Image (spheres, rainbow, N blue to C red):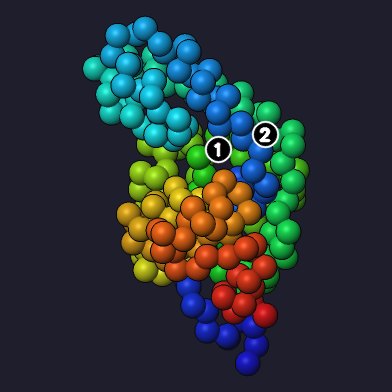
Amino acid sequence: MSEQERPRPYAGVIFDLEGTLVDFQWKIGEAVAKAKKEIEGWGWTSPLLGISDYAELYNEGIHRAPDESEEKRFLEVVDRIYDEYDKDALTRWNAQPSADALLKALKETGTPVALCSNVGRKAMDGILLLMGWSRSFKVTLSRDEVRFLKPEPEGLSKTIKLLHLSPSDVLFIGDSRTDIRTAKKVGCAVAVAAQGENTRREMEPLEPNHLLASLEPLMEILKLK
């Protein structure tokens, strides 16, 4: 049986970016602290000052904004800061072991592959160009194409629809508790590699479909070898 004829466990594969395909370099603590310093004293932002997660801060700011003008004001601050830290991470990102081989093998089988990340568009396009991955994905979706960040399901749901697939047909590959939660909300299978944002111990209680040490076992899981 040829490679093209071999049955595949999933009709499509969607990757997270940082911590998954590239190593984790984003300075979350610094970015969140800087954002909270700028919004401190706005009046409606007090509940946000106790948040330590960058995606939760972003999403809660939108939920709690009293009107559209304040939401816009909040997003202008946070997007500017997050873009700054995206740019910083871009200068230090390196491909995770097996990332190149995995993307190449998926392309050879014709499997639809997408990218869904909380990273902004400029940094995403920059790293895809630097790594030579620009043609590896049928769909790429960044922070700039959604209103809410993962673990809200908006981005991953949109990515699956753009692939013209159903959630049950897709494997989402990430490196964090956020990625697991997102996949469970959407209803797709999830594989996480403990090589980025969260450790194996931190992710295990959330019961992902596949909990791995690296991307390498995905070659077997996806029947690419």
Does any portion of residue 165 appear in the rendered image?
Answer: no
Closest to the camera, between mark 1 and mark 2, is: 2
Q: Is residue 225 above or below residue 30?
A: below
Q: Amino acid at mark 1?
A: Val
Task: Describe the element under mark 2 as helix, strand or loop.
Answer: helix
Reading the image, the residue beneath label 1 is 119
Outermost residue to the left: 66
Residue 168 placement (x, y as % from top left): 37, 68
Q: Amino acid at mark 2?
A: Ala
Which labelled disc corresponds to residue 89?
Answer: 2
**Relative depth, front residue between 104 and 93:** 93
Q: Based on the displayed image, in which of its 4 quarters is residue 135 positioned?
A: bottom right
Residue 195 placement (x, y as % from top left): 63, 54
In the picture, the quarter occupied by the C terminus is: bottom right
**Relative depth, front residue between 21 and 24:** 24
Q: Residue at x 57, y 85 (%)?
A: 6
Q: Residue at x 49, y 77 (%)?
A: 9
Residue 185 placement (x, y as % from top left): 32, 54
Task: Describe the element under mark 1 as helix, strand or loop.
Answer: loop
Q: Residue at x 44, y 48 (%)?
A: 178
